[in-house]
């Protein structure tokens, strides 16, 4: 379905771009959809009451790819408000407005709990999620992100909101807020510009935690003694027929890792 739609729309240019950004992984939309379906089934079976998907939802942010992704979420019967989505660098390779148009279009049922303007709160009882869009429209040769001073101000003002005093505050974004690469050129191409803003927030507000994607592996970093933690999860595209989801409990106003789960 997706292959045919995209071939019609983008032809050879689309095929080149999707291969280029896949870095040796097979471009097989149906196989990837099956993995996502199984991962969502695992999340449901685990009893999770909220699902966070930390970006790179598509290959290049083509409209047909967002439609396919939305179809999988719909088929999984994920309740409205129980899924938070943030875009990744892959989702912004086609245009600077692809994410906004996806939320207004195929993903509209999931827009309320997903990244839009910085500072948006998704209140899920003991947890307040702050989904942030760190993407920028750029060449497929770059994969970095941007955390703006405006985003930092918006997040900081929310942390101080008395209504959120007793909740875990969890910022969700695609790019990790630390240097992933020792090589500064690799970091410049693939890293998060403005990550110092995030680290500053974490240093000043140890109750804030981060969920990120992009690195395709488990990350569990303590920024400051106490609760301030940065968590990353494996990418289901890398897993076999039983993709793993990362589970968390909420205890004493903070997330705690509860391991990986697959079925
Ligand atoms: Fe990424």
Image: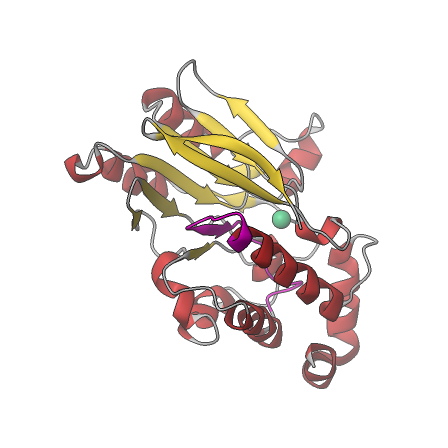
- Counting the numbered discs, the total is 0
The residue under the point 46% across, 48% down is 48
Q: Position of residue 148 (x, y in %)?
A: 40, 42
> Is 182 positioned to the left or the right of 115 in the image?
right
Occupied quadrant, residue 130: top left
Q: Position of residue 253 (x, y in %)?
A: 32, 29
- Closest to the observer, 143 or 76: 76
Residue 163 vertical position relative to residue 41 in the rendered view, above or below? above
Q: How is the image coloured?
A: secondary structure
Residue 248 vertical position relative to residue 203 in the rendered view, above or below? below
Q: Position of residue 155 (x, y in %)?
A: 31, 39
Q: Residue furthest left?
A: 162
Residue 257 in view, yes or no: yes
- Closest to the observer, 24 or 45: 45
Q: Residue furthest top?
A: 225
The residue under the point 28% across, 45% down is 125
Image quadrant for the N terminus? bottom right
Q: Which residues are magenta?
A: 44-61
The residue under the point 57% across, 57% down is 40
> Is 216 positioned to the left or the right of 161 in the image?
right
The residue under the point 67% across, 66% down is 33
Residue 56 in view, yes or no: no
In the image, is residue 57 part of the stretch drawn in magenta? yes
Residue 208 vertical position relative to residue 79 in the rendered view, above or below? above
- Closest to the observer, 24 or 74: 74
Q: Main secondary structure of the magenta part?
A: loop
> Is 163 positioned to the left or the right of 108 in the image?
left
Occupied quadrant, residue 164: top left
Q: Position of residue 17 (x, y in %)?
A: 74, 65
In the image, is residue 150 part of the stretch drawn in magenta? no
Residue 95 vertical position relative to residue 243 in the rendered view, above or below? below
């Amino acid at each position: 379905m997706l292959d045919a739609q995209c071939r019609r729309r983008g032809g050879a240019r689309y095929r080149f771009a999707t291969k280029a950004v896949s870095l040796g992984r097979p471009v097989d939309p149906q196989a990837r959809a099956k993995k996502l379906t199984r991962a969502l089934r695992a999340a449901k079976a685990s009893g999770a009451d909220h699902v966070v998907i930390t970006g790179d939802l598509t290959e290049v942010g083509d409209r047909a790819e967002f439609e396919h992704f939305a179809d999988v979420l719909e088929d999984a019967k994920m309740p409205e408000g129980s899924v938070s989505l943030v875009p990744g660098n892959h989702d912004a390779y086609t245009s600077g407005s692809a994410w906004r148009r996806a939320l207004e279009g195929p993903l509209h049922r999931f827009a309320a709990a997903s990244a839009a303007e910085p500072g948006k709160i998704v209140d899920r009882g003991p947890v307040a999620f702050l989904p942030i869009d760190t993407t920028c429209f750029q060449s497929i040769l770059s994969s970095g992100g941007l955390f703006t001073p405006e985003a930092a101000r918006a997040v900081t003002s929310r942390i101080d909101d008395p209504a959120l005093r007793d909740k875990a505050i969890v910022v969700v974004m695609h790019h990790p807020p630390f240097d992933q690469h020792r090589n500064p050129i690799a970091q410049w191409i693939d890293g998060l510009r403005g990550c110092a803003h995030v680290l500053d927030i974490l240093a000043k507000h140890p109750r804030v935690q981060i969920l990120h994607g992009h690195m395709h592996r488990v990350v569990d970093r303590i920024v400051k003694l106490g609760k301030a933690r940065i968590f990353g999860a494996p990418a289901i595209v890398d897993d076999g027929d039983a993709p793993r989801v990362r589970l968390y409990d909420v205890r004493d106003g903070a997330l705690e890792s509860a391991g990986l789960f697959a079925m």
